Image: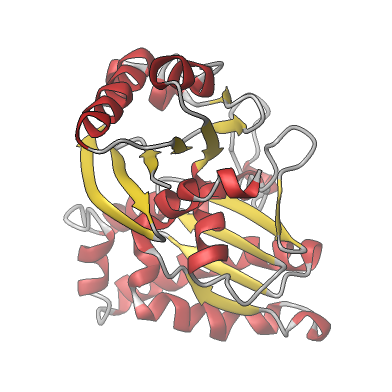
Amino acid sequence: MATMVLDIGGTAIKSGLYVDGALTDIRETPTEAHRGAIYVVNRAKEIIADYQQRSPFERIGISTAGQVDPVRGQIIYANENLSGYTGMKIKEIMEQAFHVPVAVENDVNAAAIGESVFGAGKNYTDFVCLTYGTGVGGAIFSNGKLYSGSSYSAGEFGAIVTHPEERLADQEFSGCYEKYASTTALVKNAQLLDASLSNGRKIFERLDEPEVRALVDRWIMEIVYGLTTIIHMLNPECAILGGGIMEQPYVLDQLRETLYPNIMTSFRQVKLEKAALGNRAGMLGAAVLHERR
């Protein structure tokens, strides 16, 4: 059975066909999120229609940015980066357009499902999955199943308050984990040191410089603050860490060295693993959504 797969992100829409356990015909199309949700959804429909003309499929799986009600296949909440996306009925729109079953899931949840089936989570039944990028995304697996919470939004780890002294009631995420532990936060602080340090790659190319290493180490400690809370609350077997920045070996090595002294001895059996599937995790998770319903 062929499944049409989409991963709708803020920067790109990744697409492909999932057939016999493998992704094929993988493509990447700019999202152009600044043009608004209606444009993005219509662009997704065009992508799917192009695949349908070339290779018939029996169902569609969609991983998408935003908080998602997977039962209705509807966007519960999306921030201003994708204007008008909140409330969008993705499942209904796509089923009416293509007349096949459609399953929709939040992108981090879909990535966690992908890791659980194909990647770093295969050998664990209780784990958390975090992605460090523009913000901090999260997902929870309990007893081998995705834990969604009462309104399908569990795992918003980026909203953990790690700096209450900087919390402002009228500013969303002020004082929160993602403001300090995201890759965005690392780059922002690096540019205060040197404006040319405009991305993670440039930062790590200069890791031998004491000031740059100290900055990276402070950022790693910010990651540890949130992980300490998550591990003590959920007692997972494993924390799977994703995002392009985790491809830097120094980060995971330092996290392993720094985390364990900060958690209770009875919790130190938790493993830290790098996400194994890279930018295909969401697509692979979307590919198997129908089996997990």
- Confirm whether residue 14 shows in the render: yes
Q: Is residue 131 left or right of residue 191?
A: right
Residue located 38% across and 80% down the image: 250
The furthest residue to the left: 196
User: So how many labels did they put on this image?
Assistant: 0
Which image quadrant for residue 140?
A: bottom right
Residue 96 versus residue 143 in the image, above or below: above
* Rendered location of residue 19, percent (x, y): 36, 53
Residue located 67% across and 66% down the image: 127
Which image quadrant for residue 203?
A: bottom left
Q: Nearer the viewer, residue 108 or 257?
A: 108
Q: Is residue 281 left or right of residue 268?
A: left
Q: Nearer the viewer, residue 60 or 34?
A: 60
- Confirm whether residue 136 shows in the render: no
Residue located 25% across and 56% down the image: 199
Residue 253 versus residue 235 in the image, above or below: below
Q: Nearer the viewer, residue 207 or 160?
A: 160
Residue located 48% across and 46% down the image: 286
* Rendered location of residue 186, percent (x, y): 39, 57
* Screen quadrant of the C terminus: top right
What is the basis of the colouring in this image?
secondary structure
Q: Is residue 233 left or right of residue 270?
A: right
Q: Nearer the viewer, residue 267 or 16?
A: 16
Residue 82 versus residue 286 in the image, above or below: above
The furthest residue to the right: 266
* Rendered location of residue 156, percent (x, y): 64, 44
Residue 82 versus residue 108 in the image, above or below: above
Which image quadrant for residue 272?
A: bottom right
